[in-house]
Amino acid sequence: MHKLDPIERLPDGSLFRLTPGQLRSVRGLTKRCCNFLDGDCLLLDGVCPQYISRSLLCRWFRRAVLPQQPKLEQAILSPKKLRRCKVCGTGILARSGRAKYCPACAKEVHRQQKAKSDRKRRSGVDNSGSKSP
């Protein structure tokens, strides 16, 4: 199986899934594709995969046709759950409202936070700055 470019997949490796409204808009745009003829793709000599799919499959559609509708492209390619890691800037799918880091950076950041907390606890100084008895 040919691997799709990372930009054509979500950070977790899955394909972009279309909502019913986006699907209607994409099917309308598919009909305006230069390779589309009566439900068939001229490049593939068969059924157009973009027209029958609920995800963003066709690379030609993604790069040549979808940019004609910038709002639709933004809605599909930038889902609300997609965020950037605060450390490295890679795209992550937020599973909660508190997600800030990609899995690789989260491990390191949490290790540093725990070390800082342990140093503070061992120093015997509370938050007010006075020594505890």
Image (spheres, rainbow, N blue to C red):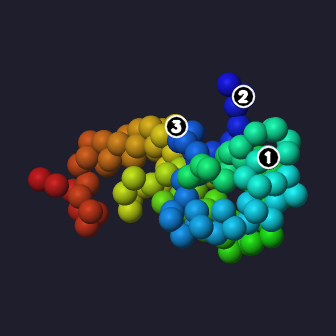
Q: Nearer the viewer, mark 1 or mark 3?
A: 1
Q: Quadrant of residue 118?
A: top left
Q: What is the secondary structure assignment of the residue under circle 1?
A: strand
Q: Earlier in the sequence, mark 2 or mark 1?
A: 2
Q: Which mark is residue 104?
A: 3
Disc 3 marks which amino acid? Ala
Q: Earlier in the sequence, mark 3 or mark 2?
A: 2
Within-10-Å neighbours for mark 3: few <14, some 14–19, many 20+: few
Disc 1 marks which amino acid? Cys
The CA distance from mark 1 to mark 3 is: 41 Å
Give x and y (percent) for residue 73. 69, 66
Give x and y (percent) for residue 55. 59, 51
Q: Which residue is the site of mark 2?
A: 2
Q: What is the secondary structure assignment of the residue under circle 3?
A: helix
Q: Nearer the viewer, mark 2 or mark 1?
A: 1
- Along the line of sight, the residue nearer the viewer: 91 or 29: 29
Q: Is residue 4 left or right of residue 52?
A: right
Give x and y (percent) for residue 93. 49, 51
Q: Residue furthest front?
A: 38
Disc 2 marks which amino acid? His
Do the residues under discs 3 and 2 have CB atoms within 8 angstroms?
no
Q: Is residue 81 left or right of residue 28?
A: left
Q: Nearer the viewer, mark 3 or mark 2?
A: 2
Q: Earlier in the sequence, mark 1 or mark 3?
A: 1
Q: Which residue is the site of mark 1?
A: 41
In the image, what residue occupies the spot 76% across and 39% down?
46
